[in-house]
Amino acid sequence: MRRRLTVGTAALIATVTAVSAPALSATAASTESIPAGLPSTKFPLGVPGVPTSAGKALGAGIEYFTLKHGTAEDGYTVSLLNAGKDAFTETTAQNLAVSAQSAGFEPTIVQFTRPAVADFPAQDYWMVRIGNWTLKQKKQAAEVVQELKDAGISSKVDYLGDDGFVTSGPWSMRVVTVDPRTFRGTFASSLGTSTAKREKVSAMAKGGGASIAVNGGFFDIHTSAAYRGDPTGISVVGGKLLSEAVSGRTAVVMKGRTVRITELASRVTATAADKASSPVSGVNRVPKPNELVLYTEEFGTKTPSTGGTEVVLDEAGQVLGVRTAGGKVTKGRRVLHGVGTAAEWLTAHATEGQIVTVKTIVSDLRKKRTIPLTPDTYVVGGGVGLVRNGKTWITASVDGMASTNMILRRHPRTLVGVSKTGKLILAVIDGRAPGETVGASFLEAAQVMRWLGARDAINLDGGGSSAMVVRGKVVNKPSDGSERAVGDALLVKP
């Protein structure tokens, strides 16, 4: 559909095409430059063609690939902002365009549709843009932003490759596949030396004895600085629940050499000697009002000083002491931390010398059964489910990522998939590097994982967090310019 919107006497063209999720092409391409282990079909993004690639074996069942595809044809534009946002209603766009035109600029109103995903409907948006410059002309775009600022109009320089609209790329990515039929190592996860603090993937790989590692799920950047290593979803390390699940969110479950992707829930309950019980709302995180939170020895720092009440438990659940919130969690100990009504519950039911039993259950919602928390069980919580049973199935809403920025715009991505034969697929698509690599939207990420053979796939944390470590070295190009400290990591241990 093509529409024209009129501002004053100027006609402004308004429509662009957002990338949807086309069916995978079965057209075979020349396999001359495709290493064994990669698909022989054409790359699913951009202009159809065979990607430039290279591959090598890193051990029994482990293959490592680099892929590049596409050409740099996108340049820069200037996007007008309203309340810090660059996409809005048609009326807001028209008003902004009138303001820009009155100030002597030539704006264009661009209409686009954020595509529907599995649990979130499509929606139309409008943007107002000025100008179109090549990759080498970013300075000219920045000068227009300053001129607009002088006129009292807020704007920003935008790289067109970030939009999520049709592009020629380019893309640069790293892929590791691990075939459990010949691989003799194990899969694991790590929160580093402390669940509260962030750590680089390379450090977690070294500490965990891993030959391959990628960053894990999102972590809580909105909490106090001392606790920002806390994953925003589930984490299980060596059979211990170290961060609770957000019920229904997708995660990666690993046990030995097996891995699967599913939706999880967790439940933690504290039961006192007098049979009184209370739900434990969180694990190793800052409590909210009236919550009971469990801290384990992996927390690695003092508990928050919330003015609440804490009881210290030994491994058998005996209350060793009662204290004001804000103390250490020593080795072999756990701490129940209560705020408000939860603190009152501890005072009434968890006195020194009594036994408080803490029971933890992790449930697989897809299979409708409990996951045994054995010492070889590891779970990494993801950001968004991408592929389910071989089909694109993006769960942006339940996974807390239902926005135009997350669904449509391109970012660096860290992706995990599992093939129908149980092969683990790890992929990092670099982005935010104009002219070098554009990253991927959720829809494009799902397409890439299906192309790589994933029956199920998940999006982990991305952006500046995206990192792949191979034999101690970060092999991708993190968009921050250097490796970022993150909450957790997925490890491949030889």
Image (spheres, rainbow, N blue to C red):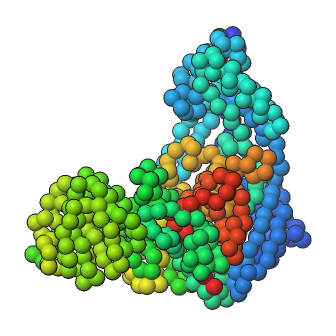
Nearer-the-camera pick, 159 or 229: 229
The residue sitting at the right extreme is: 32
Residue 155 relative to residue 271: left or right: right
Residue 41 relative to residue 480: left or right: right
| Residue 391, placed above or below residue 147 | below
How many discs mark residues in the rendered view? 0
User: Which quadrant of the figure has residue 87?
Assistant: top right
Nearer-the-camera pick, 395 or 130: 130
Residue at the image position 74 percent from the left and 29 percent from the top: 141
Residue 451 at what x, y percent from top left?
Answer: 70, 65
Residue at the image position 82 percent from the left and 70 percent from the top: 54
Residue 475 at what x, y percent from top left?
Answer: 72, 66
Residue 377 shows up from this direction = yes
| Residue 382, placed above or below residue 133 | below
| Residue 404, placed above or below residue 413 | above
Residue 468 at what x, y percent from top left?
Answer: 66, 67
| Residue 479, placed above or below residue 330 | above
Residue at the image position 41 percent from the left and 52 percent from the top: 223
Residue at the image position 41 percent from the left and 84 percent from the top: 374
Nearer-the-camera pick, 225 or 436: 225
Location of the N terminus by quadrant is top right
Residue 360 shows up from this direction = no
Location of the C terminus by quadrant is bottom right
Residue 113 at what x, y percent from top left?
Answer: 60, 38
Residue 491 relative to residue 194: left or right: right
Nearer-the-camera pick, 100 or 458: 100
